[in-house]
Amino acid sequence: MQTHTHGRPLAPSAIINRVFHFSRLKAALSRTECDSDATEIMMSVLLDYEHDYHYHDHDNSSNHSDYDDKDFADFHTVCDKQEVRSFAGVFLPVVYTLALILGLAGNSLVILIYLSHKRLRTLTDVFILNLAFADLLLLLTLPFWAADAVNGWEIGTAACKITSALYTTNFSCSMLLLACISIDRYRALARGSATANAPARSNARRQRIIMCLMVWGLAIVLGLPDMVFYTVKKQHSSGRNACRAVYPHSMARAAKATLEILEVSLSFLLPFLVMMFCYCRVGILLGQAATAGVRGGRRWRAFRVLIAVVGVFLLTQLPYNVVKLVRALDVIYILVTECEVSKNLDRANQITESLALTHCCLNPVLYVFIGSSFKMHVLKLVKRCGQTGRGYRHGNEQPTVEISLKSGTQTHTHSSSENEDTSTFTI
């Protein structure tokens, strides 16, 4: 026979302790001459029972990543998450609205420039364009989650599954594309301009298509569990519908823990390790460029770009993935047994996930707008739309500053955007 607390099986040690305490209570009550002892033991047993019963149930209106270990059966919940729902109803819509406005503006501009002016000359250009599409699709899911936080999920199960899968797919794809960009930047900088003509143009185009399909394919695989398990479930305490993952009892703990760890590994740990290796190597090559006459100012600007890319990635993604890892460990080892701790964990998940989403707004700045050639394309677009009036002067265009390193020989070149080298790292 299996004892449950809120639909979760109790650990064997908890069952043994409970049986032991109740046996002590029975023995104490049989001793009428020791009323005070019996009362003290009874209070101890009741407190222990309450401590075991106050396990969190994640019954709240927090972000997309909330999980539920119960099936559709209604279980009574002692831990009321009304405070968490109230916090989410105010915090999430504000953050999501800001992220949506800034992210739509930046990523839409990137797509517009690439499709209308800038050619996809390099593999990095292809990755950046895909990154803008992934961030844009991710941002378009935020209004649904904001509405869910305020009023609950009212647009059906199909929309719940599709929106959840789009969220996870595009979030994972964005992180994987960042790793691919770092690899291509290191490869281009290390090999130099000789690699520009190495593969035939048809082969290069085929390689780009294959790599992009591999990245999107892996991201779609990570989003499939959301398509399967997410559904609309009515919450007992609030009476509102919520879009959340519901797992059958037979696989709840294993599935939740596996998916959390898999997402942390592929969406954070793998991209972070790849970025650290590639950009550390790029930094070493830039340091060696001092002997080839590359001025310290240009090298320092390149270093600042690398530090900003890695620093922003860690600042936005590390807290969220630490919380996800804690949630996975809680599923495996049942670490959280207090209601207040559960509430704090839910709030931490909401805040850190919102912080992680800000990376979609920063990607255009980190990977595109820093390059002077892209600034020139933006100015051309603004001039065409007539928004700059007479303040725009064609003669003020600044050439792209690039550094190309190959086989121990370092040179720096000045070129316009029309003559961009396919294997140079643009500062």
Image (cartoon, rainbow, N blue to C red):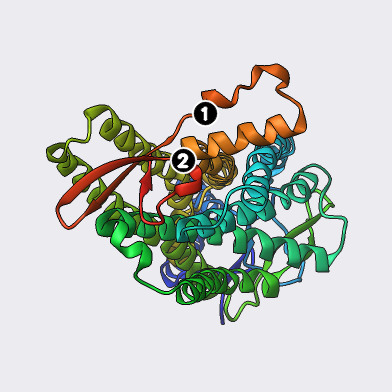
Is 274 left or right of 28, judged from the image as shown?
Answer: left
Residue 390 image position (x, y, % from top left) = 70, 17
Q: Quadrant of residue 297?
A: top left
How far apart are labels 2 and 1 at the CA level?
Answer: 9 Å
Look at the picture and state if 393 lies above or below 117: above
Residue 82 image position (x, y, % from top left) = 72, 41
Residue at 62% x, 77% y is 249
Residue 408 image position (x, y, % from top left) = 14, 53
Q: Identify the element where label 1 is drawn.
A: loop
Residue ranking furthest to the right: 155
In contact (CB < 8 Å): disc 2 and disc 1: yes
The amino acid pointed to by label 1 is Glu
The amino acid pointed to by label 2 is Ser
Q: Residues within 10 Å of mark 2 (few under 14, many from 20)?
A: some
Q: Is residue 21 visible?
A: no
Is 309 left or right of 380, judged from the image as shown?
Answer: left
Q: Quadrant of the C terminus?
A: top left
Is 121 left or right of 309, judged from the image as shown?
Answer: right
Q: Which mark is residue 328?
A: none
Sequence order check: which comes first, mark 2 or mark 1?
1
Q: Quadrant of residue 388?
A: top right
Q: Which residue matches tag 1?
A: 397
Residue at 61% x, 50% y is 114
Residue at 62% x, 45% y is 110
Q: Nearer the viewer, residue 1 or 141?
A: 141
Q: Which residue matches tag 2?
A: 416
